[in-house]
Image: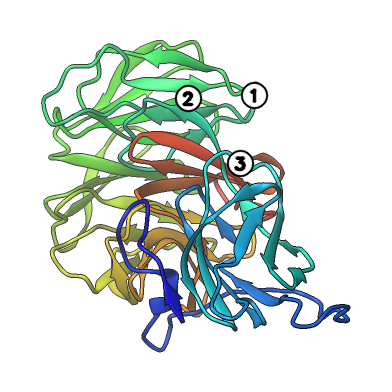
Amino acid sequence: MSLWKKTEKPGPSVEKAEGKDAGKPEQPVNKVTVTGKNRPQILSVSPCAAIPGGEMVIRGSDLADNGRRPQVRFGDQPGSLLLSSSNRLIVRVPDDVVSRSLTVETGCGLSTAASVAVGVTIAQNLHPVSNPALDPDGNIFATFSGTRGQKVSTSVYKIDLNRVMHPFLNEVMNATGLAFDREGNLYVSSRMEGSIYKVTPSGQRSTYAQGMGVATGIAFDRDGNLYVGDRTGTIFKISPDRQIFVFATVEPSVAAFHLAFGPAGNLYVAGPTTSSFDHVLRISPAGEVASFYQGLGRPQGLAFDINGNLYVTASLGGNRGVVRMTPDAKAELVVSGYDLVGLAFGRHGSLILATNDSLVDLALGVEGMPLGK
């Protein structure tokens, strides 16, 4: 086995999954007839989706030629090889990948290509701290939140269908959570002011609610009630006529609460604590709090697909990226990547991922759960 120094962000490799729920989704590759001696063969890639800087584990046979360094390419772009043996490689995904084809080349030949998905950066110079949000037309909205008390020129940006970024909203201190109602109005929380703002599609802003503590994540239920996570430990419920109730109390978060409603009407809540073995909570419509899953590191953004699977930006078994949880709480890492804070399902099966300074569009081929379902 050969081991090379990592050239980018340090951190645990995706090979170190541990725990009974640490799944390893893989992209199977059909076995091919070998035409040359010791030609490399790829049997699987895990996970088979990543953003630039993420890591993939390649399993197969004859992947290294007598200890010499093989070449792993995404199309014609080389990846950074982190670990190499004859039956396993770990590669870091390079920037600006446009091909879905991954190959391994040694001195004995070139492997058959495996299919992978790599995200494309669509917006930069942002500061998201939670999920992006999409309006009914598919435009994407994301924050420049800033540090606590920082005044910024633009609080929320709009990324249109041509992937052009426009200023949308200003003068909201520490814009944090975003959510759309069924009429296409955008709601924005301010963790500094403890306020919720309502913004029309034309950008007209009004105050919707105040006194929400350290207001972070927000989400609507199917009846039009808005839920607000105060990171000091309270989940507020605001009715359509703006009556405010304490819906539930939970353990405080060191960063923010992230909220999403599941298909059965339960509210799911993630919030990083000082633990490395955090929960995703499930709260019933009656406000009863239970643990849905425990064992994530720094869980943040949440979103459901059309089949009721929950996607969470988190670490699983030391591996950072997007974790998919089935309705019966079976977890697996499906996207590898660092610095992820939020996510939202886009058009045509894409997954829009928010890092701490950018948005990435990943063609995952999964449809999101429609708003209000």
> How is the model colour-coded?
rainbow
Between discs 3 and 1, the one toward the N terminus: 1
* C-beta proximity under 8 Å, tags 2 and 3: no
Q: Nearer the viewer, residue 122 or 166?
A: 122
Q: What is the secondary structure assignment of the residue under circle 1? A: loop
Q: Which residue is mark 1?
A: 161
Residue type at numbered disc 3:
Gly
Task: State the residue position of label 2.
Answer: 185
Q: Residue placed at 49% from the left, 10% from the top?
A: 202
Residue 326 appearing in the image: no
Percent of width and height locating residue 3: 40, 72
Query: Mark 1 touching mark 2, by CB under 8 A?
Result: no
Q: Quadrant of residue 176?
A: top left
Name which of mark 2 and mark 3 comes first in the sequence: 2
Which of 67 and 10 lies nearest the eye of the viewer? 67
Residue 204 at what x, y percent from top left? 40, 10
Query: Which residue is more in the foreground, 292 or 128?
Result: 128
| Label 2: which secondary element | loop
First of labels 1, 2 by sequence position: 1
* Viewer-closest of 308 and 103: 103
Which residue is found at the position 62% from the left and 31% from the top?
Answer: 138
Residue displayed at 76% across by 77% down: 39
Mark 3 → mark 1, Cα distance in angstroms: 11 Å
Q: Across the whole image, how many numbered discs are drawn on residues?
A: 3
For badge 1, the amino acid type reads Leu
**Would residue 287 appear left or right of 29 to someone viewing this image?**
left
Q: Mark 2, residues whose alpha carbon is within 10 Å: few (<14), some, or many (≥20)? A: some
The numbered dot on residue 34 is: none
Say what amino acid the circle numbered 2 marks: Asn
Residue identifier under label 3: 346
> In front: mark 1 or mark 2?
1
